[in-house]
Image (spheres, grey):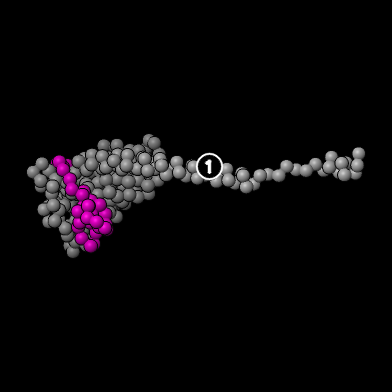
Amino acid sequence: MSSTDQAQLQNPLQPQTPSFAMLRTLGGIAMLAGFLVVMVFQWTKPIIEENKRIAIEKAIFKVVPGAASRKNFVLSAAGLFPAETPDAQGETIYAAYDANGELQGVALEAAATGYQDVIRILYGYSPACQCVTGIKVLKMAETPGLGYKIAFDPAFLENFVALDGKLNNDKSGLENNIVAVKHGNKSQPWQVDSISGATISSKAIARMINDSGQRMFPLIAKHLSEMQGGRE
């Protein structure tokens, strides 16, 4: 056996990785996966949007007592616009009317970080009593058990049947901050009686309504006559 053969036996050639072919295969798989993700998103998007619309519509009639119909608006410091107005900037609000077409209240969305994740709600506001008239939790990921009580506990939800949201004298904000207090310590109509053991979630609900109210209630008061005349 020659010295060359002996060297090949002692140091066999390592098989070379077909890097280009491997990268091409991986690239193809990645492109296919991305395409499928886009296709699934495009397919499910209208379904998700429709489910969201139905959930919000049901919630509107729950948080605004006496509501039978509603009209969507976009509201901001720039003004009040029908929701279908092109390029309208602001927050979407839902003006709710009774069977006779009289404005019963306004439903608004609000969100804040809870114990584990963002909690999102729809709540009703009555310009007549300047008070919150109800809430409906749309999204949450709180701890099953105590944290979930913010959505279902009757005593907690009673906080929002007529929660004080009066404006100050110059109508620039709330007369009193809406705040959560320790369970059993509620003494004012603008306070939220927390759920014992779920204080963080309770505070998140109070905070989001306060932040939203400070910003939106003055705008609602400013454009109230337009909403009263904008019934369908």
Say which quarter of the image contains residue 56: top left
Going by the numbered disc 1, the residue's amino acid type is Ile
Left or right for 80, reference 33: left
Say which quarter of the image contains residue 46: top left
Say which quarter of the image contains residue 173: bottom left
Element marked by disc 1:
helix
Badge 1 crowding class, 10 Å Cα cut-off, few under 14, some 14 to 19, many 20 or more, is few
Please name whichever residue, 76 or 170, is drawn nearer the observer in this view of the structure: 76
Residue under the point 28% across and 51% down: 209
Please name whichever residue, 84 or 223, is drawn nearer the observer in this view of the structure: 84
Residue under the point 40% across and 46% down: 117
| Span of residues in magenta | 65-94
**Residue furthest to the bottom:** 170
Total number of numbered discs in the rendering: 1
Residue under the point 23% across and 62% down: 78
> Can residue 214 be seen here?
no
> Can residue 61 be seen here?
yes
In the image, residue 195 sits, relative to residue 208, either above or below, namely above
Of the 4 image quadrants, the one containing the N terminus is top right
x%, y% of residue 72?
A: 21, 49
Left or right for 35, reference 212: right
Residue under the point 32% across and 39% down: 47
Q: Which residue is mark 1?
A: 29
x%, y% of residue 166?
A: 19, 55
**Residue furthest to the top:** 145
x%, y% of residue 145?
A: 38, 35
x%, y% of residue 214?
A: 26, 57
Tell me, yes or no, whether the highlighted magenta stretch contains residue 163: no
Please name whichever residue, 141 or 161, is drawn nearer the observer in this view of the structure: 141
